[in-house]
Image: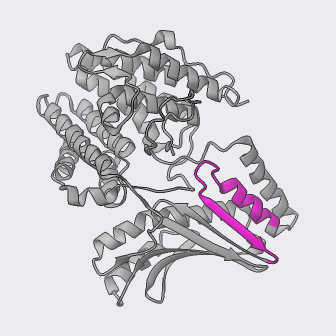
Amino acid sequence: MLDKIFSWSKKKPGEEVEPAIIFGRYSDNNKSIAKVEKWNEADNLFKEKKYFESIRAFFEYLSDDETENVFHTREGDKGSFYFFQGSKIIRGHYNNSILEAEALLAIMPAPNVPVMRRLLEMNFTLYYSRYALSENKVCMLFESEVITANPSKLYYGLKELATKTDKQDDLLVQDFHSLEAIDIEHLVPIPDEEKEVKYRYFRKWIQETLDLINRIDADKYSGGIAYLLLALAYRIDYLIVPEGKLLLSLEKIVEIYFRKDDRQVNEKNQEMMDCFQKLLDKEKSSFFPFLFRSKFTFSIVTPQNFKTIADAIYNANQNINWYKENKLPEVAAQISEYGISYCQYSYSLPRPVSELFQLYMRVNYSDYFSDLGFKENYFNKSANTYNKEAITLNIEEIQSRWKGKYPELKFKTDKLKFDNEVAFNQSFTSEVESLNLETR
C-alpha cells in the first residue's frame, strides 16, 4: 500500500513531510529477501514435521514491517494470531491437532432466510473456507489439520478468507438492512476535509469525462471513448480509494467492457456512461461512508511477468497517433493513462513501477494532490509548465532506492518530453514500458 506517499526517500532536516494518504491497492508481491527466506524456512520446517516452527516462520513472512499488520504469539503447545485485511480482522488459534481462523461479517439479530440463502450460494464458490453462523453472528471460517497446514495451504486459505470477508461484510450490511456491522473499530476515519476534496474531484472527473464524450462522434471514436471511461474508473479506484459498494460499482463498470458478449463497443460505452451518471448523482451521505483507512495483508490482484505489463502499455500507446491526427489531444492523453493505470488496477506491480505510476498521477493531477495538502507541485496547470527538475529528481530517487534489487533498472529521463500533456504522458509511459526489471 502506498500509504506513505513519497516519504520513502530520506527527508532533509526540517523538511516538511507530506500527508500520509493512502493511494492504490495494496500489493504483497514486493517481499524483501529476508521475508522470502522466511517462506523457504517455513516450507523446510514443515517438511521436517516441525509444524509449530513452520507456522511461526509463515506468519513472519506474512507480516509487513511498515504497516504492522500481523500479530502472532505462541505459548507451549498452543498459538494464536490475528491480522488485518481492510475492514476485517481475521483471528485464529492452533494446537497440536488443528489450526482455525475466523472473521466476523455482521450481526443477524433474527434468522433471515434471504441472508442464509445468499451465504449458501456463496459457499459454492469457495475452495478453502466457508460462510457460517455463530449464534447471532455471520462469520467465515477456515480450518486445517496442523499436519497438512503447509505454507501454501495457509497462504491461499487465509487469503481467500481475508479477501472475501473484506468485500462481503459491507455488501451484506448494505443489501440486507436487518444486518448490523461488526468488528470495525480498527478502521481509521478519514478527515472530513479530505473526504470533501475526494468527493469534489470524484464528481469533477466524471463530469469532465462525460462532457468530453458528448462532444465527439460516439460511433467514429467508440474505441477512444472506451479508453476514457476505463481510465476514469481506474483513476477513481487509485486516487479516491473507495471501499464497499462504491468500489463494487466501479468494478462493475470495468466488467461491462471486458464481459464477453456480442454487443458493439458503443453499446458497452453507453452502459458505462449510464453507470457513471448514477455515480455522479450520489450525495455526500452515500459517498463518505465508503472512505476510510485500514491495513491489509493480502493483495486482491496477482503479480504478472513484466512483459505482460510492458505489452499493455505499448498497445495503448500505439493507438495515440490517430487521435492526435484527428485533433483530439484530450483523448490521446487519456489513452496513455489507460495503459499504465490498467496495469496498476489489474496486477500487483513491482514497487518501483508503482512509485513511478504514483509520480505520473501526481504530474497529471497536480491540482488534486495540492488540494489534499501535498506541497511539491510537479505541474503548473495555469501556466501549463512542468517542474522538470523535481520530476527528474524523483525518478532518480526511485532508481537509486531499487538499484540493489533491480541492478539494470534505468529510466532515461533525457527522453521525457515536456511540450504538452500528450507528449509527456506518452514519453513517460514508454520509458516505464522499456524498464529492465531483472532481479539480482
Q: Is residue 95 visible?
A: yes
When asked about the image quadrant of residue 160, the answer is: bottom right
The residue closer to the viewer here, 213 or 308, is: 213
When asked about the image quadrant of residue 320, the answer is: top left
- Farthest residue toward the front? 14
Q: Position of residue 196 (x, y in %)?
A: 25, 47
Tell whether 193 sits left or right of 158: left
Q: Position of residue 90 (x, y in %)?
A: 56, 69
Count of labels shown? 0
Q: Position of residue 387 (x, y in %)?
A: 39, 16
Q: Quadrant of the C terminus?
A: top right
The residue closer to the viewer here, 307 or 234, is: 234
Q: Position of residue 87 (x, y in %)?
A: 45, 63
Which span of residues is magenta-colored? Answer: 53-77
Q: Is residue 144 visible?
A: no
Residue 394, compared with residue 212, is above or below; it is above
The residue closer to the viewer here, 363 or 323, is: 363
Residue 32, compared with residue 84, is above or below; it is above
Tell whether 263 sits left or right of 28: left
Residue 229, compared with residue 384, is above or below; it is below
Residue at 29% from the left image edge and 30% from the top image edge: 367
Q: Is residue 62 magenta?
A: yes
Residue at 52% from the left image edge and 22% from the top image edge: 395
Tell whether 93 sits left or right of 212: right
Residue at 33% from the left image edge and 28% from the top image edge: 366
